[in-house]
Image: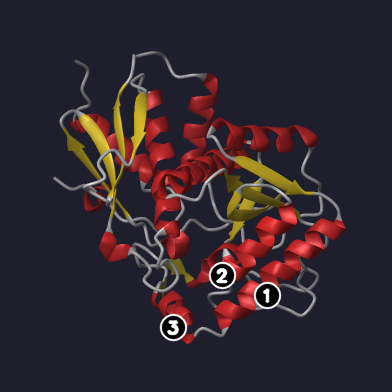
């Protein structure tokens, strides 16, 4: 019977820790058990205010699972993924067991190479539109993970979304517990986790269409307003159970790496998902039967600064 070994665990964890997470909390742990690579939530890193339901943790663990899948695939040792394999262990989110060995596909190699280059781009994008072929690729990336991506086309749709997002942002800005928690994860550049102050968006201005989180309050350069008609994408799943959110996390990372491989950039807009009333309003605005899990802004721009990562050894448990 095929088994993963210590070297496989190290490669999977080294890729997994580069997944995105809300406020860069990095809420994951990796272990090798009975020849399988397991990915677990780290309860000590859960945001008790912003993520009291565990939604953001599960998205992050799903994204880490996708990275780990790629790392094993490029070694010629692809994985079969079982989500939430042991309901008696609620922190165990995914178990990766060896599938039939094969060479990696071109797409797997390209996406794996994009892992260290993926960044959240919170600054204004360039005015160049996202080409139709790139739009098709990111839609296909979501579909490959049993999720879907709605691209909001036209200013009527974008303006409607913007109102929902700004309303949710105002709710969160008025929540002192939420703001205190976020400030606790905003650090100097030398911290191994959290968001460096320099990685935040420039301070908001009245003409901004979409809300962005500013961690340092720095002003933007003259003439660097945000794009007037951004490409906004809404990632949804058929259900809203913990397993659906893990699927959404894998889809999110597949999308983000596809964006990176296409020479594009993205930033995540989570406020409309974090506020239940806004999320319900967004769901109804899409006129679909799914559940929005995250919204994205996609375009062209210089890569943002890398957020820090803990050492691989710190994320491995024995």
Instruction: Judge depth for marks 3 and 2 and give the one in front.
Output: 2
Q: Where is mark 3, residue-wise?
A: 177
- Total marks placed: 3
Q: Quadrant of residue 31?
A: top left
Which of the image's four quarters has the C terminus? top left
Q: CA distance from mark 3 to mark 1?
A: 18 Å
Picture residue at 49% right of the left edge, 34% below the top: 113
Q: Where is mark 2, residue-wise?
A: 275
* Label 2 with label 1: CB-CB less than 8 Å: yes
The 10 Å Cα crowd at callout 3, few under 14, some 14 to 19, many 20 or more, is: some
Q: Quadrant of residue 260?
A: top right
**Left or right: 310 in relation to 186:** left
Looking at the image, what colour scheme do you see? secondary structure
Please state which of residues 215 and 21 is positioned toward the viewer in this rendering. Answer: 21
Q: Where is mark 1, residue-wise?
A: 167
**Left or right: 200 in relation to 59:** right
**Left or right: 230 in relation to 24:** right
Looking at marks 3 and 2 on the same chain, the residue that comes earlier in the sequence is marked by: 3
Q: Is residue 270 visible?
A: yes
Q: Secondary structure at mark 1?
A: helix
């Amino acid at each position: 019977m095929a088994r993963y070994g210590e070297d496989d665990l190290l490669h999977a964890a080294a890729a997994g820790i580069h997944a995105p997470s809300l406020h860069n909390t990095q809420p994951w742990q990796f272990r090798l058990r009975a020849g399988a690579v397991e990915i677990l939530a780290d309860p000590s890193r859960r945001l008790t205010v912003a993520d009291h339901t565990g939604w953001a943790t599960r998205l992050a663990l799903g994204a880490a699972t996708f990275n780990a899948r790629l790392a094993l695939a490029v070694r010629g040792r692809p994985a079969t993924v079982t989500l939430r394999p042991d309901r008696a262990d609620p922190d165990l989110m995914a178990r990766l067991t060896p599938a039939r060995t094969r060479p990696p596909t071109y797409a797997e190699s390209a996406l794996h190479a994009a892992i260290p280059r993926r960044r959240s781009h919170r600054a204004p994008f360039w005015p160049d539109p996202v080409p139709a072929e790139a739009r098709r690729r990111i839609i296909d990336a979501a579909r490959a993970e049993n999720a879907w991506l709605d691209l909001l086309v036209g200013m009527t749709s974008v303006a409607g979304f913007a109102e929902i997002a700004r309303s949710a942002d105002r709710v969160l800005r008025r929540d002192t517990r939420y703001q205190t928690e976020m400030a606790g994860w905003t650090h100097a550049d030398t911290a191994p986790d959290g968001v460096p102050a320099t990685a935040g968006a420039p301070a908001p201005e009245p003409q901004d269409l979409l809300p962005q989180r500013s961690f340092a309050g720095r002003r933007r350069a003259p003439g660097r307003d945000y794009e007037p008609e951004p490409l906004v994408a809404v990632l949804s799943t058929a259900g809203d159970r913990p397993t659906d959110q893990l699927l959404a996390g894998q889809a999110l990372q597949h999308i983000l790496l596809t964006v990176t491989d296409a020479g594009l950039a993205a930033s995540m807009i989570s406020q409309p998902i974090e506020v239940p009333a806004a999320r319900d309003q967004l769901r109804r605005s899409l006129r679909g039967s799914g559940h929005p899990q995250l919204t994205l802004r996609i375009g062209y721009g210089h890569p943002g600064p890398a957020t820090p990562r803990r050492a691989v050894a710190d994320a491995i448990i024995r």
